[in-house]
Amino acid sequence: MAFANNHFYQQQPVIDMKKFKNIAFIILTLLAWTVFIGYGFIDGFLLRPITSQDSAEAFIDATKQKIKNEFVGNVAMALIENGKVSETFFYSIDRPVNENTLFPVASISKWVTSFGVMKLVEQGKIDLDKPVDDYLTRWHLPKSEFDNKKVTVRTLLSHSSGLIDDLGYDGFATDEAIQTIEESLTKAADAGSANGVAIVGYEPKSKYMYSGAGYTILQLLIEEVSGQSFQEYMSKEVFVPLDMQSSTFDYLKESNSQLAQIYTVDKTTRKMNKFTALAAAGLYTTTNDLSKFMIANISENDVLSEKTVQKMSKAETFINNTKVYGLGSHLYSQDDKESNIIGHDGSGNDAINTAARIDLKSKSGIIVLETGNWNMASSIADEWMFWKVGIADYVVMQRNKSYLLTLLIIGYIVIIGISVFIIRKMK
């Protein structure tokens, strides 16, 4: 018996080692497959675009399915190819919309306003790097522990001014009196849950922090320097030269038949709020007009020189070394060398969502204006960026999760099946 037991204990480790190697190989292969899928998810090379076809018609057809799957009250969409509108799509559950229907575009107002500000810079009436307080008489930045002289037109345009207002404006109901610009900057009554006070709360130029009040200060700056109301100035200096015939910062003067119905997430309609902060949130425009504005960013125009437009698209603010914002527009290409996408999104007011983005290199772009859904426009624009240039955002990643999970599981099954087959063959 002693001999037999010794023989067993001498041979058993050899058998266990083979099993261990086989199991280790399977585990390592499964781990490698998991890493591959994970990297493909993060890097984007395994993600699938919303359509595999390379045509504007195919992209719009794919977005129609997305619209069917979620509630949206109305949508106006335009695609730009080679500097021209190539395809449009319009949808509404009630009153029809078209290329001349006025939509509230929320924060896209900031991008359009930046053209008006830079017009004053080109005319030599303001300096990008001079303290903004030097131009103001009706209101001044309140004292803080930081140097207000570092708050310039440049830092206001690029959201690096040090302001901590956290605005997002809710606006005022049509039967409510609105604040003056000065009152709003002192304490915005339509701030919602935001701080709502235009005060410097961190070192100017030190970081990016989105500020609605920064653009309300620019609105005041335009009025003080030009001697005109903000609406009059923007119409004369931006809308008329770009032939934006329908665009307005005073929608109450427009015929109701031109206005898109404002849907909320519960599928009802309501009247649109009005704003003191017009430069930050008050623009009404159409896909027809907005396409003209976007094309002005990639071609000669009657508002700004090509040199100025190029300057506006350069990164002024960063988050973790990633380019975030220029002089009036978001920068969407990040570190991608094959594209240079700028633009702006807008949202809020239960529920307006808008997106306008254009690639300065390929001269292609997208406009999506909608009401009734919190993020339909932005998510379609995100899908467009991945479809067009391969830049994967959160929306694209979320849409691909089930596909990649399926791919992961199929890979597991194949790896285990092949491994078991090989092991049996080797016996």
Image (cartoon, rainbow, N blue to C red):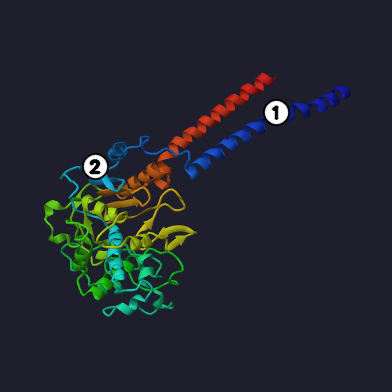
Q: Amino acid at mark 2?
A: Phe
Tell me which corner region of the image, top left, top right, bottom left or bottom right, holds residue 167.
Answer: bottom left
- Real-space Cα separation, disc 1 to disc 2, in angstroms: 61 Å
SS for dot 1: helix
Of marks 1 and 2, which one's residue comes earlier in the chain?
1
Q: Residues within 10 Å of mark 2 (few under 14, many from 20)?
A: some
Q: Is residue 164 visible?
A: no
Q: Are marks 1 and 2 in contact (CB under 8 Å)?
A: no
Q: Amino acid at mark 1?
A: Lys
* Figure check: 410 above or below 168: above
Q: Is residue 408 left or right of residue 198?
A: right
Q: State the quadrant of the C terminus.
A: top right
SS for dot 2: strand
Q: Residues within 10 Å of mark 1 (few under 14, many from 20)?
A: few
Q: State the quadrant of the N terminus.
A: top right
Q: Is residue 399 visible?
A: yes
Q: Is residue 103 left or right of residue 206?
A: left
* Figure check: 216 above or below 374: below
Residue at 67%, 33% (x, y): give it.
24
Point out residue 119 in the picture as x, y percentages from the top left corner.
Answer: 28, 67
Point out residue 69 in the picture as x, y percentages from the top left corner.
Answer: 30, 38
Residue wearing tag 2: 89
Residue wearing tag 1: 19
Residue at 39%, 78% (x, y): give it.
149
Tell me which corner region of the image, top left, top right, bottom left or bottom right, holds residue 271.
Answer: bottom left
* Figure check: 414 above or below 128: above
Point out residue 400 in the picture as x, y percentages from the top left corner.
Answer: 43, 39
Select label 1 or label 2 by which is in front: 2
Q: Nearer the viewer, residue 266 or 306?
A: 306
Q: Residue furthest right?
A: 3
